[in-house]
Image: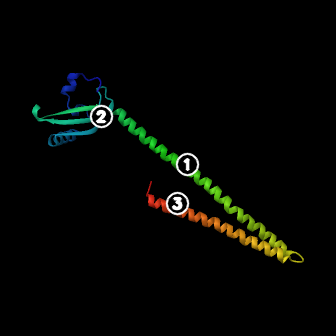
């Protein structure tokens, strides 16, 4: 608590420097300290120049000294700043993890779209060929049947891709339920 002389500090009352507590609150803390013998709490104090800073107050009742309460005040500005910085870093890490999940989701979506588009393109291509084989002057039933078989094969392939995606999302969902919320 820079700028205060040693004599000022020895005779100072908590109300003289407390920036956040009313006289009633200070009186209540004094009673609590007298009842419990000691206590420790964080507060905000005012320097002689009026600037505010975070402190940790350790107060102890001294019955030998006529029932006085002696308080030791430690500047914890650096600790509070570090706590705020840790919280800011935790939030940045959470945002980065969220962006990472979004990127992964985008890549997964592109992969799924490709996997589903492959057999669907085959279905469309084979359906067109089947129609051409049937539309000719002399329909080529053998080729039309083969095209229809390829349509069925590609349709099943698309269904299998979707079934694998469903199974994967179900496994992920179940593992997240077991793990609980993040």
Question: Quick check: marks 1 and 2 in contact, CB under 8 Å?
Answer: no
Q: CA distance from mark 1 to mark 2?
A: 39 Å
* Mark 1: secondary structure: helix
Relative to 134, is 32 above or below?
Answer: above
The picture quadrant where one finds residue 44 is top left
Residue 165 in picture, x, y percent from top left: 60, 63
The answer to which of marks 1 and 2 sits earlier in the sequence is 2
Mark 3 vs 2, N-terminal side:
2
Q: Position of residue 83 (x, y in %)?
A: 38, 39
The image's colour scheme reads: rainbow
| In the displayed structure image, the side of residue 164 where residue 139 appears, left or right | right
Residue 55's disc is 2
**Is any atom of residue 20 visible in this view?**
no
Name the residue rendered at 77%, 70% in the picture: 127
On the image, numbered disc 1 is attached to which residue?
100
- In the picture of the structure, the residue carrying the numbered disc 3 is 172
Q: Residue at 48% of width from left, 47% of height from top?
A: 94
In this rendering, the label closer to the viewer, 1 or 3:
3
Numbered tag placed on residue 133 in the rendering: none
CA distance for labels 3 and 2:
47 Å
Foreground disc of the pair 1, 2: 1
């Amino acid at each position: 608590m820079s700028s205060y002389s040693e004599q000022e500090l020895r005779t100072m009352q908590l109300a003289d420097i407390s920036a956040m507590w009313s006289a009633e609150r200070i009186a209540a803390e004094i009673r609590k300290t007298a009842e419990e013998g000691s206590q420790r709490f964080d507060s905000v104090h005012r320097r002689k120049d009026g600037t505010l800073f975070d402190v940790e107050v350790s107060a102890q009742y001294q019955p030998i000294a006529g029932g006085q309460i002696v308080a030791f005040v430690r500047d914890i500005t650096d600790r509070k700043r570090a706590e705020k910085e840790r919280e800011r870093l935790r939030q940045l890490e959470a945002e980065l993890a969220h962006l990472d999940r979004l990127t992964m989701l985008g890549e997964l979506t592109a992969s799924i779209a490709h996997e589903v588009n492959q057999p669907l393109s085959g279905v469309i291509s084979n359906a067109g060929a089947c129609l051409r084989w049937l539309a000719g002057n002399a329909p080529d039933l053998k080729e039309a049947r083969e095209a229809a078989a390829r349509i069925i094969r590609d349709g099943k392939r698309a269904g299998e891709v979707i079934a694998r995606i469903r199974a994967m999302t179900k496994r992920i969902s179940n593992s997240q339920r077991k793990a609980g919320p993040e």
